[in-house]
Structure formats: structure tokens, C-alpha cells
Amino acid sequence: MSSGSNARSALIFRGLVWAGIAASLLAGGWGLLVWSSARGARTPEALGALDAAPSPPTALLLGSLALGLLHPKAPGRLRRAVGMACAGGVVAMGITALFQGQGLGLTQAILVLLGCALLVLGRHSLLHSGRMEVFILPALCATLLVFNSLLHGALKSAEAPDLLSSAGLELQSAAGLLLLGIGVLCARPEQGLMVRITRNTLGGFLARRLVPVTLLSPTLFSLLLAVLERFTLLGPLMKAPLFSTVATSGGVGLVLISTAMVDRIVLKRRHASTALAASEARYRGLLETAPDPVVVMDRRGVLHLANDRTEQVFGYSREELIGRNVEVLIPERLRKSYQRNFEAYMLAPVVRSVGQEVSLHGRRKDGSELPVEVSLSPYLTAEGLMVTAIIRDVTERELHLNRLQQAHRELERLQQEYVGIISHDLRNPLQVIALRTHMLQRMLEEKGLTREAHLASGLLRNTQRMGGMVEELLDNSRLEAGQVELRWQPTDLARFLDEVLERDIPPDSRERFRLKTAEVPPVPVDPPRLERVLVNLLTNALKYSLPGTPITVRLERTESHAEISVQDQGQGMRPEDTGRLFEKYYRTREGRLAQGIGLGLYISRLIVEAHGGRIRVASNPGQGSIFTITLPLKLAAREESATKLGAA
């Protein structure tokens, strides 16, 4: 039975409970109303009603209240107490009426049994639900007997039944008691006898369809016979043959209907079994042909499934793995941390991969280890939460990565050596060329050859620019190799910035700079190195900002850092440029038109990071740029000890 069928069945049983409550309330209320009216009227039509005691109507009201209060699985304390009191009232009224000899003794016995069933219903957590059926089933059988006898008596009467008469009130009370008893029986559909009807089995499926037919058919057929006999449409001699014929035909019909239902269910289950077998075969084929080891474990980590690849990689047979904890595939040194991580994962299981950010290892049967990555996928089954783990052996990838890293390190070493050799071989000739060019320029100026002196001046500038490029290559090589030792000095950054602007900025451009400083204690830096970074930022601001626009240089302090920022009002940069601006040899589209090889900002980043700080840029197209240097106010312990050792 599907979840939809379960929901429909639960809705039907809940409807029967509330139908019993409503019917008993109406029958009890109407009976009390008629009884009270008859006592006051004293009319001949009402004298018959005076013989009916108020016990059944009152008991119906109390029983409906008790069922309404007690049928939830966990009623509140006050609700339960009131419901138990109402159920006890039903028992008390039945016993009292039984000893007083009011009406039929069978009706009073029904009240006692029904009240006892309600009492047991209210104590379902303490008593077994089967004890409630000891009371409710005899009560239902007796109520059905009383109801049928009263109904047949009313049909055989020569006059139409009067609802205000004693017989009419008794019939209404019997109907109310019958529906109330059915409501009590349906209040716990998951316990006792009702489980036979509600369970998700073939028997339950047949019971839900055949029990209503078997209960209603005899009563309806007997009523039909009584109606036919009353209106002389059926002779007395034909009742027994007709009843036998219909009963036989009905029994055969029920058997045929049951057979058809069983055949249909068996056919559906056969189709479902075939589809399930095909699905399992596809799943098994997919599992066995997977290129990686795949295991399935429960929330305790116990293995329930392993594929062929698991045997090949880890060396265990499936019989050795199934039923054991997955820890058998983990090195002993990692099992404690695995247990903690697995318990944390099971608190909020989601699809995730493990081993990409951190190193993760598995353990083979022979004790050897292998690097792995694991993908976890949780899913719910009838047995509870299960987790599928796909284990990937990344040994080959690790080997390739190690080879790649070694090759990269070797390439960097060769590159540094190559740059160092070229730079060293270029620097000396360039120095000689610069010196001779300078001497040539002076000689030409002394002889009054102005045009030739101007050409020599251009040659000198280009030689100096080439020398600067060579120095950048050398500095880059030293910084990347970690061969640069910083000479730490406590420095007043406000005075230092003022001196840099005075010393390194041309006089005709100095008026564009606005220096704004806050109170910052002396900061340990390497002044020449930091000056080089600042000169790079300041000259870039002059180079890429609009002529005549101001450039703001700020010095600020945070809790543990000093910040130096250079803000221009230039064209700004695109987001794709700001993300790569400090990379080696990277130049923006506008920067490619200017002189340089794209090492200035890269070397600046290396120098700032060597100080334990960082450099960043914020820029938008058309809104200028802000370069910010963050420097720690204090040296790290390692640099501070090295500084003291050097001083000693």
C-alpha cells in the first residue's frame, strides 16, 4: 500500500471516529429533549415516552464527550481527566439502570461494556489495546442485535414509526450506540484487531474491502425481506429459499471478488518484482563496472556493500568487509580523527567531497597506505540512513603533481640563474655606456654643439632606463629566491612620506600631492625598500591620472597596522585588471603603451609581503584608483629575534 493509500485510510478511520461522536451527540441530545418535553406535556401521545428512562441518551452524551477527549494518542492531563470522568459516568449509569431494572437489560450491559472500553482507551499507554477489544466487541455485537430487533419490529408494525414514541427513541439510541462503538474501535487503528485491517499486507487489503460488505449485506438484505413481506410482495414460504439463494450467490460473489483482487495484486507485485530485479541488475552492473571503489555503510559506519573495485584496490574480499566498520580501510593513526569527523557528518549529512583540501589516506589489507579522495552521498532506506562512499585512488595524480612541482622548482631555479647571468652581464656594459655617454654629453655642451648634446642626452636616458630594467630583473630574482635581507629600522612614517615626496617627486609635480597623516607610532621597516614601493605608486599615480588633478596620500592607523594609501583621479581600471595587477609581467591595456616590463607592482608586492604586510587596489572605470599598503606595527617574533641577533 502506497503512502497515498495510507493517508486515505487514516482519513477514513478519523472520519468514522468523528461520525460516531456526532451521531451519539445528536441521538443523546434528541432523546433528552424528547424525554424532558414528554414529562412536562403529560399528553397521551407522550405517555409512552415517559416509560423511557434518560439513561441511554445521557450515556450517549457522556460517551461522545469521552471519545472526543480521549481518542488523540497523547491527550493533555486536564483533557484526559475529563474524558475518563465521562467514561466512568457511562459505566455508572449502565450499572445503576441495570440494578433498577429500567428497559432491556441488554442495553444497560452495552452501556457498561462501552464505558469500560472508553476507560481502557484513556489508559492506552498503560494497558494493552487488546483489553479494549474485550469490551468493545461484545458491546458492538449486542448493540447490533438490539438495533436489528428494534428496526425489524418497527418495519413489522402496522403503523409508521413515530420518532417521539418509546420505540422510536430506543431505535435512535441503539443507532447512536452502534456508531459510538464503531468510533471507539477505530480510535486506535494501529493497535490490536484493527491492525489486521490497516496493515500494509494482502490480508489488510482484502479486509478493508470485504469487512464493510460482510457487515452491511445481511442487515440490508433482511431489511429488504421485511419490507417486501410488509407490503405483501413476498410470501412467508419464500423467505427462507430466497435468503439461502442470495446468501449462496453473495458468498460465491465474495469469493470471486476476492480472487480477482488477489490476482490483480499478485500481478502488480510480479510486475513490481520484475522491475525491481531489473533495477537491481542495472544498479549492480553500474556498481561493479565503476572505475573507483564504492562502499555503502550505515550511520554507525558498518559496511553493507562493496564493489569489485574495492577488492582490487584494498586487497580485501567482500566477505571480509561486509559487517565490519569502515575504519578497517583507514590507517590506525587517522582513525580517531575519522571517528570525530564521521560523527559530525552524520549530524547533518549532505553530499560532499573529502580529501581535496586536506590530505586523506586509505589503508590496504597488507598495511600499505594510499592517498585517496572520498565523495559521500547520504540516502534514506527502510533500514535507516545509509551513506554511499566513492573512494578515488589519487596515487598517480599525486606522483604527477610531485613531478610537476619538482619541474616547476627546477624551472624557477634555472630562470633565476638565467636572469641573474643576463642581468649581471648587461649591468656592467650599461654602466660603462652610461658613463661614456654622460662624458660625451658634457664635451658636446662645452663645444656648443647643442643639437648633438641633446641626442646624447636621449641616449643617456634610454641607457638609464635599460639599467633600471636590469635592476628590476635582479631584484625580482633575489626576492623570489628569498635572498633579500631587510634592514629593520623604527621609522616615523609621516616624516618618511614627506621626505619621499620631497626627494623623489619632480618639483613641477610636487604641488599635486596632498599628504594627510594621522598619529602613528614608529613602525619597523626597511626604509630603502619601502621607499622603492612608494616611489612606484606615486609615479604611477602621476603617469595614469589626468593632468592637474590632485593625488591624495594618507597615513592611517588601525588596531595593529599602519595603512598608507595613494588615491588618484585617473581613468580607473576594469575588474579583470585589478584582480591580476600584482602578477608577474602583467600589464593593463593602458599600461602596455607606457615604458616598463610589468615587474614594478609585482616587486612592490614581494617587498610589502616581506615586511609582513599586504598591498591591494580598489578601482572602478572612470573613478580613479586607490592603492593601499598595510604594515604591521610590530615585528613578528622571528623577524624581531633576527634583528636583535644582527645588532649583536
Image: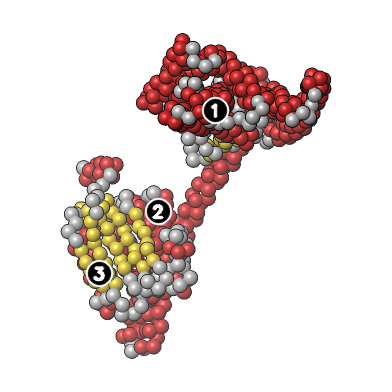
Left or right: residue 350 versus residue 560 is right
Q: Which residue position is annotated with label 2?
A: 478
Label 3: element kind: helix
Q: Which mark is residue 637?
A: none
Quadrant location of residue 58?
top left
Quadrant showing the N terminus: top right
Amino acid at pointer 2: Arg
Q: Which residue position is annotated with label 1?
A: 165
Q: Position of residue 401 (x, y in %)?
A: 56, 42
Q: Residue at x 56, y 31 (%)?
A: 163
In this orientation, does residue 391 appear?
A: no
Kindly indicate whether the residue at mark 3 contacts the one at mark 1 (C-beta within 8 angstroms).
no
- The image shows residue 108, relative to residue 178, as above or below, that is above
- How far apart are labels 2 and 3 at the CA level? 27 Å
Q: Position of residue 632 (x, y in %)?
A: 27, 51
Q: Residue at x 50, y 18 (%)?
A: 111
Label 1: element kind: loop
In this orientation, does residue 458 appear?
A: yes
Q: Residue at x 33, y 71 (%)?
A: 568
Q: Which mark is residue 501?
A: 3
Other residues around mark 3 within 10 Å, as few (<14) / some (14–19) / many (≥20): many
